[in-house]
Image: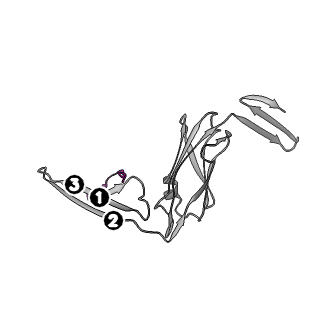
Amino acid sequence: GNAVAGEIAADGASWVPERHLAAATKYAVHAVAKDAKGRESAKDTTFTTLVPENTFIGHYTPEDGSTVGVGMPVSINFTRGITEPAAVEKAIKVTAEPAVEIEGHWFGNDRLDFRPEKYWAPGTKVTVELHLDGVEGRPGVYGKQARKVQFTIGRSQVSTVDASSKRMKVVRDGKQIKD
């Protein structure tokens, strides 16, 4: 199996994984402790995480491998209402190359969007990592999804409509092409 990243907890007596452990998964642990005199003691054990009765996943856009416009957010619609938004948001990582600060925003309790403050830069490569396995999204309801999605930002084309004058301005790659 794969190693699980983590660290010794502040109490010095337990270990905390970097991410939630996947549900319904058997883990093997090999622990070695060293005392003040340098003597070692090892222990091996296994355990299986719970098999949740109630689960949720996130349906996301854009699709993996797609090319989208500069204004397209990463949008995740959850199959169950989320009452623990901080835990769910912490389990989702959105990064961009070139790097840009990306913020998450909830719409109700079942939709989470991510986007930069301004438009994406054309040519940006965006990666979305969903690490929802084992995350408790609401009491007794656990995430059941581990997925990595990548997409590209295409050319810049921004259309602005003035409803009062019934006119639309189109700017493509920084140049106005219609008014």
Q: Nearer the viewer, residue 32 or 10?
A: 32
Numbered disc 2: secondary structure:
strand
- Mark sitting on residue 49: none
Q: Is residue 164 left or right of residue 85?
A: right
- Say which amino acid is labelled 3: Val
Q: Please, which residue is most extreme toward the top here? A: 175
Residue under the point 88% across and 42% down: 166
Which residue lies under the disc numbered 3? 32
Which residue lies under the disc numbered 1? 29
Which residue lies under the disc numbered 2? 47
Residue 100 x, y percent position in the rendering: 55, 37
Residue 2 lies in the magenta stretch: yes
**In the rendered structure, are the residues bearing label 2 and label 1 in contact, judged by CB atoms less than 8 Å apart?**
yes
Residue 75 x, y percent position in the rendering: 62, 51
Residue 141 x, y percent position in the rendering: 51, 68
Measure how far apart labels 2 and 3 are at the Cα level: 17 Å
Numbered disc 1: secondary structure:
strand
Q: Which residues are magenta?
A: 1-13
Measure how far apart labels 2 and 1 are at the Cα level: 8 Å
Q: Nearer the viewer, residue 124 or 3?
A: 3
Residue 41 lies in the magenta stretch: no
Q: Is residue 166 left or right of residue 114?
A: right
Residue under the point 71% across and 30% down: 173
Q: Please, which residue is most extreme toward the left here? A: 37
| For marks 2 and 3 on the same chain, the one whose residue lies earlier in the sequence | 3
Residue 113 x, y percent position in the rendering: 61, 51
